[in-house]
Image (cartoon, rainbow, N blue to C red):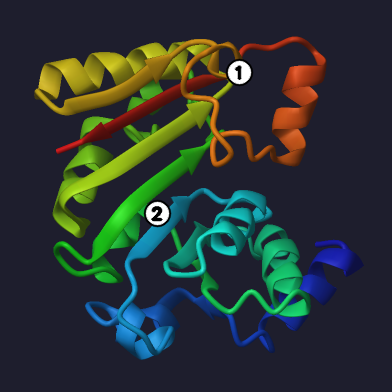
Amino acid sequence: MGKDKLRRFAEIDTFSNVLQLDAGKEFKGKWSSGFFKNDNPLVLELACGKGEYTVNLATMFRDKNFIGIDYKGNRIWRGAKTALEEEVNNVGFLRIQIETLLDYFAEGEVDEIWITFPDPQPQISRERKRLTSSRFLDMYKLVVRSGGFINLKTDNDDLHAYTAEKIEETGLNLHAKTEDLYHSEFANEVLSIKTYYEKKYLKDNKNINYLKFSF
């Protein structure tokens, strides 16, 4: 592991807005009251990477609590550090495997989930790893409150089509669907938040897909 990664791993251990692995389990069922010390709605970003979307959402919506989830601590470091420097106090980061989500969040505890530019896991053999596969949808159905939303924003056309099929197969409620977000009716301020990678995709004239659904 490079010196920069080691430094970041050591530094996030000192960050008050980062919890790693088992440390987050104590807040299951009480993230808002226990971690954020309020009763505001809880929003997750899964596979948050550097946390750009998480921090921007938290800045826009101070009346909600946001948690960015990823397993790579050197990525989380950037978002967590930005939040601390800019005093964005309604955002935290959790370093866990997303497969263990049910160990950290209680039934109906989450108000909304964002999945922004995840690894599309294109190989058929890795379908179960896709964050909109049946096993992950089953997890989301447990932790998201009745009527809560799931948002998928992706440059990958195949993942978008796969997820749309899952929504139809499972009988979920589809609220928004587009293969070209920035030329659609859905391109509002929230969906126009752009991560580093999205800016690269747009520079290459790549279309951005978006889906919003609920259980």
> Measured from the top left, where is residue 149 in percent x and y?
28, 43
Answer yes or no: is residue 59 visible: yes
- The quarter holding residue 137 reads top left
Q: Quadrant of the N terminus?
A: bottom right
Q: Secondary structure at mark 1?
A: helix
Horizontal side of residue 201 vs 69, given as left or right? right
In the foreground, 96 or 202 = 202
Q: Amino acid at mark 2?
A: Ile
Q: Secondary structure at mark 2?
A: helix
Horizontal side of residue 164 vs 1, given as left or right? left
Q: Is residue 102 above or below residue 162?
A: below
Q: Amino acid at mark 1?
A: Tyr
Residue where numbered disc 1 is placed: 182
Mark 1, mark 2: which one is toward the viewer?
1
Q: How many marks?
A: 2
Answer yes or no: is residue 124 visible: no
What whole-number distance in Å separates the C-alpha atoms at marks 1 and 2? 29 Å
Q: Is residue 162 above or below residue 196?
A: above
Q: Which residue is located at x 40 percent, y 79 percent?
A: 24
Q: Which residue is located at x 81 percent, y 65 percent?
A: 5
> Measured from the top left, where is residue 77 in percent x and y?
71, 67
Q: Residue furthest right?
A: 3
Q: Residue 79 bears which disc, if any?
A: none
Q: Quadrant of the C terminus?
A: top left
In the foreground, 213 or 187 = 187
In the foreground, 208 or 137 = 208
Q: Which residue is located at x 23 percent, y 21 percent?
A: 166
Horizontal side of residue 174 vs 199, given as left or right? left
Residue where numbered disc 2 is placed: 98
Q: Which residue is located at x 14 percent, y 28 percent?
A: 172
> Measured from the top left, where is residue 107 in percent x and y?
14, 64
